[in-house]
Image (spheres, rainbow, N blue to C red):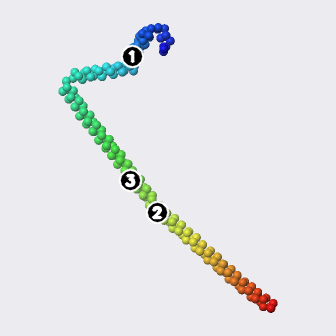
Amino acid sequence: VSHHPILDDLSNPSQQEHFLNHINHDLENTAPLLIEEKLQHTFFSDLAQAMNEVPNAMSNSIFQKFYVKFDDSIVDLIKSEFENTQNIFLVNEAQIQSELEDLKSKMSGLEDPVVNQLNYMNFLINELNLNEHNRFEQKKRRICDLCSMCEKVNTKLNVLQESRNSSSH
């Protein structure tokens, strides 16, 4: 199965393979990414070969100095970052403390108005209770007055009933 019409003209599979290899070779030589990859490979290959040619004592000395310098740099970086983090914590703590003091001041300023409001509400509740009690007492007196009147009417009716009964005999 052919992938391109030009390849159909090439009847022999070996001709097709040769043609595709030629295109692949041209791409390797001209494609920038492939060139970069080749340069990288060449660099690492040359570096490995150069490292093999450097005497062991010299390369060990170089690497040891590099590691000491690298370790010192890392330690300094870590110390610096740690100090920066501590400074951030100190600044944040100071800000939080300031905000807490401000909040405490505002809360203490609210204490008197809240106490006054509660006292006023207690006064209103006491007034309502007193008014309710007075109304209750008034209704109680009226009910007692009604009961007394009912008793008087009942007594008069009984007297009237008895007087009729006695006059009819």
Q: Earlier in the sequence, mark 2 or mark 3?
A: 3
30 is higher (above) or lower (below) than 64? above
Q: Position of residue 113 (x, y in %)?
A: 49, 63
66 is higher (above) or lower (below) than 93? above
Q: Are marks 1 and 3 in contact (CB under 8 Å)?
A: no
**Position of residue 48 in the picture relative to residue 34 (left or right):** left
Task: Report which residue position mark 3 lands on.
Answer: 97
Query: In the image, what residue type sits under mark 3?
Result: Gln
Marks 2 and 3, how far apart in space?
Answer: 21 Å
Q: Is residue 30 visible?
A: no
Marks 2 and 1, how far apart in space?
Answer: 83 Å
Marks 1 and 3, how far apart in space?
Answer: 67 Å
Q: Residue at x 28, y 37 (%)?
A: 74
Instruction: From the image, state whether disc 1 or disc 3 is nearer to you.
Output: 1
138 is higher (above) or lower (below) than 57? below
Q: Residue at x 45, y 59 (%)?
A: 107
Q: Which image quadrant is residue 51 in? A: top left
Q: Quadrant of the C terminus?
A: bottom right
Q: Position of residue 149 (x, y in %)?
A: 70, 82
- Which of the labelled discs sits on residue 111, or is there none? 2
Q: Residues within 10 Å of mark 1 (few under 14, many from 20)?
A: some
Q: Residues within 10 Å of mark 3 (few under 14, many from 20)?
A: few
Q: Residue at x 64, y 79 (%)?
A: 141
**Mark 1 secondary-structure assignment:** helix
Query: In the image, what residue type sits under mark 1?
Result: Glu
Task: Report which residue position mark 1 lands on.
Answer: 28
Instruction: From the image, state whether disc 2 or disc 1 is nearer to you.
Output: 1
**Mark 2 secondary-structure assignment:** helix
Q: Nearer the viewer, residue 18 or 169?
A: 169
Q: Nearer the viewer, residue 78 or 106?
A: 78
Q: Earlier in the sequence, mark 1 or mark 3?
A: 1
Q: Residue at x 31, y 44 (%)?
A: 83
